Every structure is written in C-alpha cells, then in structure tokens.
Image: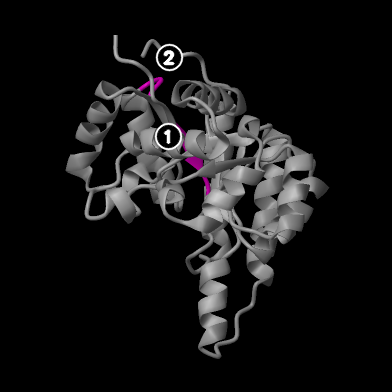
Amino acid sequence: MVQSIGIDAHIHLDSYPAGEQQPLLDRAVANGVEAVIAVSMHKVSCEANRELAFRNPGIVHPAYGFHPEQPLPEAAELDALFAWIRERSEEGEDFAIGEVGLPYYTRTEGEAEGKPFDETPYLALLDRFAAFAAELDRPLILHAVYEDAAKAIEIIQRHSVRRAHFHWFKGDEATIALMIASGFYVSITPDVGYEEEIQSLVRRYPLELLMAETDGPWPFEGDHAGKQTEPEMIASVAAEIAAIKGLSVEETVRTLRDNTRRFYGLAASAV
C-alpha cells in the first residue's frame, strides 16, 4: 500500500490542459496523495471541476465560486452561478464554496499605475458568498491577503461562517492573531521552502490550523523551479513545515492531512 503524503487543499485542476488532468491525478494517487480540493474560477470552471469529481469519486472534491482577480460579470451571470450552486446543494452533492475573496493584486497593481479601482462590488460579492456559505453550511475558501484579509474577516464573521480557509495567506501580526483566535485555517504552498514571509507565518501559526496546498498550476521556484506544479509537491510543504516547527515529517504529514479531512468533512482514504 502506498503511504499517504496527505491532501492538496487547493488546486486549480481544471486549469491544466484537458489531456493532462487525469494523468496528473493518477500520478498523484500513485505517489500517495489522498485527495485534492479543486477550486473554481467561474461557472464554466465549476462545471469542469464537478465533472472531474464525478470521474474521480473520493479523490477530487470540488469547490464552486468566482475568483476575485478578474473582472466581474454582469449580474445575470452571477445570479446564474449562485442558482447553479444551489441546485448542486439541493441535489445533495458534496462541495465547498471557493475560490472567492477580494482582488488585492488587481487593485494594487491598478493603483500603482494610477488607475482608479472600485472595490465596492467585490466586497458585495464576497458578502453574498459568505452569506451563501453560512446558509448552506459549506466550507469557504478565501483569496484575501494583506489588508484585504481584515475586510474578509469582518464579512465572514458578520455572517457567522463556520469554516473559513485562507489559502496562500500573507498578512500582518494583528490579523494573524485574529485569525488564530477565530480558528481560521491557512494552507501553505511550496514557496515555504524559500520565502521568509511564509516561513514566519508557519512559525507563528498553530499546526492544528494548517493545511498543505499547491495552487497548481501556479509555478514555484527553489527546488521546484522549472517543474510543472503537481499535487505531490505537498510532500515538500510538509517537510518544510516539520523543519520549521522541529517536528517529525511523519507527524506533520499526518496532522496536515487530518486537519484537511476534518475541515472538509472527508472520510479517511485507503491510500
């Protein structure tokens, strides 16, 4: 039996070329990856991840949402997305809400170029997704970094979101302390091997609130430079976290995996 190396808590599976998606998953499972959380960009992305989940039961766990680092569609298109997600819930399907959040990079890049940016509709959309996640009692996967994290926290706390997962988080000490006190989860990417900011976050954040992710197909540097990002890279994430916290790799892999299972309500795998 292949030894488990854990769960990739955040990957854009449908963003890989269509012909590479299934081989990537097959390699991941053969190398000990139990499952992946496949986050979505928009409605077409949601539909693609749903299909991948149907073809890979117990391996692909989809999340449905609208990524904030892109122009917002017309209201009717967003309404159609929310209606589609509600249908999935009414049919009893298992899914999370994500990736949703606030457009930090789009906003700050525009502001640096002197372009006006209206964040108001993005705040309203996150508010709507937070209310939806609370209503459906689904995990909420957030793209909210630096000063945007505090805005997101205010929104999700106002709606009493029960399970919040901040992926690839960066932020100040006060926000980190608030997130820890609130029991919010954070997932760590392979850049923990070379980014001091992420290493510092790992030192500060309780292991019991951490998960491992790749955010694939986003590429990485360090030992992964020039390589296609694949779910197996969570093994290096666990190894780096273990080294930072002075723990065994085996204990760290097990805790990260169990955290992800618990947060997403996943059954133990046979891997």
Q: Residues within 10 Å of mark 2 (few under 14, many from 20)?
A: few
68 or 128, which lies in front?
A: 68
Q: Looking at the image, is mark 1 or mark 2 earlier in the sequence?
A: 1
Q: What is the span of residues highlighted in magenta in the rendered image?
A: 57-65
Residue topped by disc 2: 269
The residue to which callout 1 is attached is 239
Depth check, front residue: 25 or 238: 238
SS assignment at label 2 = loop
Q: Amino acid at mark 2?
A: Ser
Point out residue 260 in the picture as x, y percentages from the top left corner. 54, 28
Residue projecting furthest to the right: 158
Q: Residue furthest left?
A: 19
Q: Is residue 94 above or below residue 18?
A: above
**Is residue 18 found left or right of 233 in the rendered image?**
left
At 51% from the left and 15% from the top, the residue drawn is: 267
The label nearer to you, 1 versus 2, is: 1
For the N terminus, give its image quadrant.
top left
Q: Secondary structure at mark 1?
A: helix
203 lies above or below 22: below
69 sits to left or right of 201: left
- Mark 1 → mark 2, Cα distance in angstroms: 21 Å
Dot 1: few (<14), some (14–19), or many (≥20) neighbours within 10 Å? some
Check residue 197 for magenta coloring: no
Q: Are marks 1 and 2 in contact (CB under 8 Å)?
A: no
The residue drawn where x is 73% and y is 46% is: 179
Can the viewer see residue 89? yes
Q: Which amino acid type corresponds to the residue marked 1 in the rendered image? A: Ala
By what rule are the colours in the image chosen? Answer: one colour
Residue 141 screen position, x and y as percent = 58, 44
Q: Where residue 122 sits in the image (x, y, percent)?
A: 63, 65
